[in-house]
Image (cartoon, grey):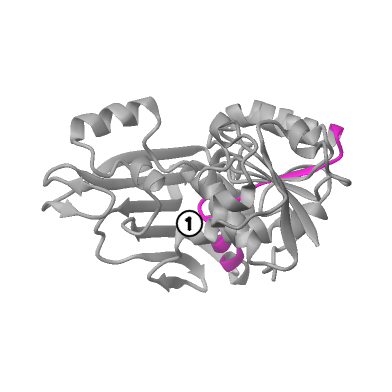
Amino acid sequence: MINVIQIGLGPLGQQIGRYIADKNKIQTVAAVDINEALMNQDFGQLINGKTTNVSIKNSIKDALINLREKPDIAILTTVSSIQKLESQIENIAKHGIPIVSTCEELSYPWEENPEVSAKIDTICKKYNIACLGTGVNPGFLMDYLPSVLSSVCKDIESITVERIQDATPRRIPFQQKIGAGLDLKAFKAKEQTGTLRHVGLKESVYFLAGSIGLKLDNVTEELNPVIAEDTISITSMDIKKGDARGVEQISHGYVNGICKIKMHFKAAIGESRSYDRVSIKGVPSFTSEIDTGVNGDIATCAITINSAKSIINASPGLHTMATIAVPGYIN
């Protein structure tokens, strides 16, 4: 049995808790959230209405105090910013617990955040634990999966990765993160603060480049609203004609002025078709497509849980999906 401490009990953390509760090879034995309103609540009551012996605490120290043994792994679902995550990782690492985090910027941080990446790597090695940033995207669909697909190629000229998704069934925080329902002035204002975007697209470009041996000399990224052509009404919101129904981001990776990697991410309410597509131009050239796409909320929770065995057995330090053993489904 794999014992887990869950840290961060927002919508994603709660969904992960529900998925773990349905399994027989892994269990949540401790839970932490800084929300004072959750203090001493029963974790099971929060996630699925079933009483457990797990009481939610506001600190890791308090959550561990009555456990006979430390958990095998910490699942950390708190922030997207690696800068904000550093102290959280150190606080967990002090207890000698390996970490799987859903922090997007942690998925491949070495290029965009080299200094804090080195600090986290040093912290993990100091306390002899491994740490991984993963998720469906970044962490799998736009970086790890195309890296795997590239392994059947003799030569590669360029790779294009597309993730187009209808955000209607996604959780409300995700819909808000992509700017759905905002007028264009509010969209632009949130974009300028950095709070409105898909986090991790550049990290995916660098991950894929590293996997296929490319040293990129320039990486660009552009972000634009997806405009509603008609009024849209869904359970979570009403979107007026002319307002944003989502976001489109495109990133290019160049070598000597030639585009070698293109990432196209689009998530919007009312998108007509969802799909995930990897197109490789090389020897052989081919396209691999997942029709209807992979549900991001389900897959993020699943890959976070299923990475547990891999990170428990990984060497100390900061890892990416490219440096751990291939995760497998946990029953």
Residue, x 86% and y 32% (percent of image)?
Answer: 126
Residue 165 % position (x, y): 35, 59
- Residue 226 is left or right of residue 276, and the answer is left
Residue, x 68% and y 26% (percent of image)?
Answer: 87
- Can residue 77 be seen at all in this image of the molecule? yes
Tell me if residue 185 comes above or below residue 198 in the rendering. above
- The amino acid beneath tag 1 is Asp
Residue, x 68% and y 54% (percent of image)?
Answer: 52
The region drawn magenta spans 126-149
Quadrant containing the N terminus in the rendered view: bottom right
- Residue 116 is left or right of residue 201, and the answer is right
Residue 54 % position (x, y): 71, 47
- Residue 307 is left or right of residue 186, and the answer is right
Q: Secondary structure at mark 1?
A: helix
Front position in the image: 107 or 160: 107
Residue of label 1: 297
